[in-house]
Image: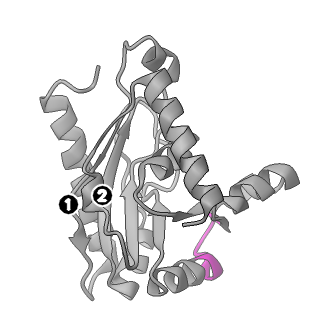
Amino acid sequence: MSTYYYLSQLFLRLVLWALFGLRVKGRENIPRRGGVIIAANHISLADPPFIGSVCRREAHYLAKEELFRRKAFAALIRAYRAFPLKRDGVDREAIGRAIKLLRSGHALLLFPEGSRQKGGELGPGRPGVGLIATKTGVPVVPAFIQSSDHLGQAILRKRRLRITFGQPLKAKKGDYKEFARQIMERIRELKNLHEERGMSV
């Protein structure tokens, strides 16, 4: 991990803890070495930097290509290892790059739903994450983030900003669409655990 990335990660983590009372569970489930996919729900534009700030290692990101249209912002997110993804159809170039990164031992943060979801409900998992996972055979760590879409209430402690990482799933050769469904089911289990323990407020 580069010094610049590490210091930025540490700074943001401290800000999230001080301002929003960030709580993190399950970081130990992220392998320290080797290719790994971190697959999380998506409710806010803030999700990538928030989740990335608490990972135990440097992560690469797939980001929608529209975010790269402004040069200054594109330069910023590229500095944090983001690369573009075309959301219409199958972006073979982006998928190929993701597979190469994972086979080279890097971590990749993905949002299986493909776009932000509103109202607290989880959307279906798109097949791309299952395809990348089954092609590479790397473990997939499910992650659940809550309240990143209600930061004003989090500051007032009316909501809790929390990120939880679950036990890794091991991809097997086979139906990648079914594996994408399994990933979302694990994320749903983390969400249900929050609700059962009264962690939603």
Picture quarter containing residue 169?
bottom left
Q: Is residue 143 magenta?
A: no
Q: Is residue 41 above or below residue 106?
A: above
Residue type beneath disc 2 = Pro
User: Which residue is under mark 1?
Assistant: 167
What's the CA distance linking mark 2 and mark 1?
7 Å
Give the residue displayed 31% in from the left and 63% down from the top: 30
Check disc 1: other Cα within 10 Å, few if <14, some if 14-19, many if 20+.
Answer: some
Stretch of the chain drawn in magenta: 86-94
First reached walking from the N terminus: tag 2 or tag 1: 2
**Residue in front for this viewpoint, 35 or 201:** 35
The answer to the question of whether label 2 and label 1 lie on touching residues, with beta carbons closer than 8 A, is yes
Magenta stretch, main secondary structure class:
loop
User: Which residue is under mark 2?
Assistant: 142
Left or right side of 132 for 134: left
Pick out the residue farthest to the left: 196
Q: Position of residue 34 (x, y in %)?
A: 38, 79
